[in-house]
Image (spheres, rainbow, N blue to C red):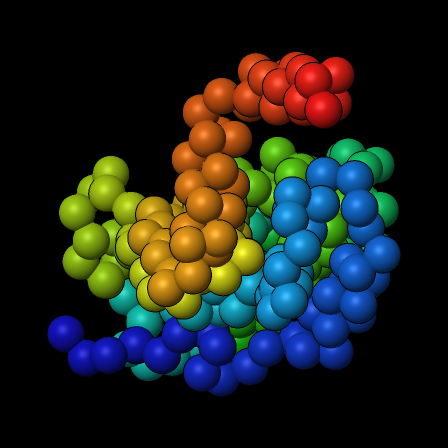
Amino acid sequence: MDYPKRLIEVDLPIKEISAHARREKSIRHGHISTLHIWWARRPLAACRAVLCASLWLDPADKFCPKSFRISVSTVLSQFAKQVRSDKTLMALCQSHWTLWNSLNQTRLNPDNEACYWDMRTALLAFIADFANWDASTNPAFLQTARALTQAAHEALGGEPGSLPLVVDPFAGGGSIPLEALRIGADAYASDLNPVAVLLNKVLLEYIPKYGQRLADEVRRWGDWISLEA
């Protein structure tokens, strides 16, 4: 199979991603930066956007499999429909409201070559909007991103039901593997620094597995140490 280009090879909404990354610096509640200070932490907004653009194919590329274009048409048409009917989504997609308000399967026809550019534009707009911290846990964004990740993986020959793999051998504070999991990929993370290894273990394994129970236990033992000190 001829190699189809990924979105990151043709375009990326850098200005919008950068704006979201700057805003992220002031966010504390729920952000992984509150788990542990890391001196070279990558902005989640940038990692999320770059991973999406690296895993998703460019529909306008002549070698892009038709199955991916069909998925883009279906998934983004449904997302646009949700944007038009959901006030929360509408607010999150305000900067590209004109696009989402007019997008439908006619404009994203996988059998019409003239529509491939609209597909690319819509994917890039989605990436820009998804870079927003407020969109990072929104169910519609997550469902759409994961569907596109799966579609791209299977279009390139991935086993149906399996996940694409993102490997970060210098994971540091864990931004890249965390965002890989968020958008529906599997992730392997490692680092030479044992502190980074512990951070990633907690962030990627313990928190998803134990959730609030882990937080409660940390508080309980923290209180015990304070009393015994």
Q: From what the image shows, is residue 140 above or below residue 116? A: above
Lateral position of residue 111 relative to residue 133, left or right: left
Image coords of residue 21 (percent x, y): 73, 65
Q: Quadrant of residue 23 in the image?
A: bottom right
Give the residue drawn at x 61%, y 23%.
218
Res. 170 visible in picture: yes
Residue at the image position 47 percent from the left and 74 percent from the top: 7
**Residue lying at 42% horizontally and 54% vertically, measured from the top left:** 194
Q: Is residue 103 visible?
A: no
Give the answer, above or below, for where 56 lies relative to 113. above
Toward the viewer: 86 or 102? 86
Residue 80 appears at what percent x and percent y? 66, 47
Q: Which quadrant of the rendered structure holds the C terminus? A: top right
In this rendering, position of residue 116 left or right of residue 229? left
Q: In the picture, which quadrant includes the N terminus?
A: bottom left
The residue most toward the bottom is: 10
Q: Position of residue 17 (x, y in %)?
A: 70, 69
Q: Nearer the viewer, residue 188 or 108?
A: 188
Question: Relative to 121, is 144 above or below?
Answer: above
